[in-house]
Amino acid sequence: MLTIAHHREILARVAYRLTSVAVAHLYNGTVLTLAKMPGTTEYQALMERLADAPPAVPPGRLASWRRWWNKKRGRPSTPEVGVLASLLAALRSEASSALARPVTHVAVTLLPIAAIARQDLADALEHAGLHHWLGYSSFF
């Protein structure tokens, strides 16, 4: 029988495996795999840590200011955002090469890891130079 800790460990490993793939869904129903990126050790450690973490809470006033200040200086808003943005930027580069055109808008799918804040994902997309396909969505 698997314990909760084992389930979280499996979830973290699945997140590591599944979230480092870029695919294109064409209008005719074809799905093309554009890039498969091995996650860095930082990314793998982040996913394992987030799998065991409590649900994300909105940042407080000081944390919000730090995030804003880092973004104004051209840095990732948090170290976690930097790790996510690095992977997204690498996937964007590979996908752009495979399509022979720049990739600017993406749809992101995630495993249900409650510790990944929507704001972190939005900041990671912004730092990687990407826009969410549903730019009008309240989630991003």
Image (cartoon, rainbow, N blue to C red):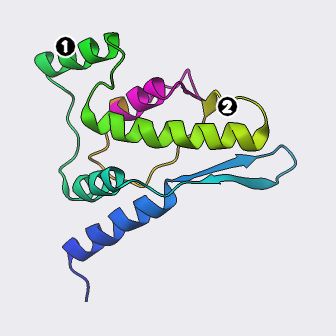
- Pinpoint residue 40: horizontal percent, then vertical percent: 39, 53
The magenta stretch spans which residues? 120-140
Which amino acid, mark 2? Val
Give how far across and how far down residue 116 sits, in percent. Answer: 32, 43
Q: Position of residue 98 (x, y in %)?
A: 74, 44
The residue singled out by tag 1 in the image is: 65
Give the camera-side residue of 138 and 66: 66
Q: Is residue 65 left or right of residue 84?
A: left
Tell me what residue is drawn at x 28 percent, y 69 percent: 9
In this view, the residue farthest toward the bottom is: 1
Residue where numbered disc 2 is placed: 103
Give, as a three-letter code, the residue at label 1: Trp
- Under circle 2, the secondary element is loop
Residue 95 in magenta? Answer: no
Residue shown at 24%/12% (left/top)? 69
Q: Gap between marks 2 and 1, in whole Å?
A: 30 Å
Q: Is residue 1 left or right of residue 60?
A: right
Q: Which residue is found at the position 63% from the left and 29% from the top?
A: 105
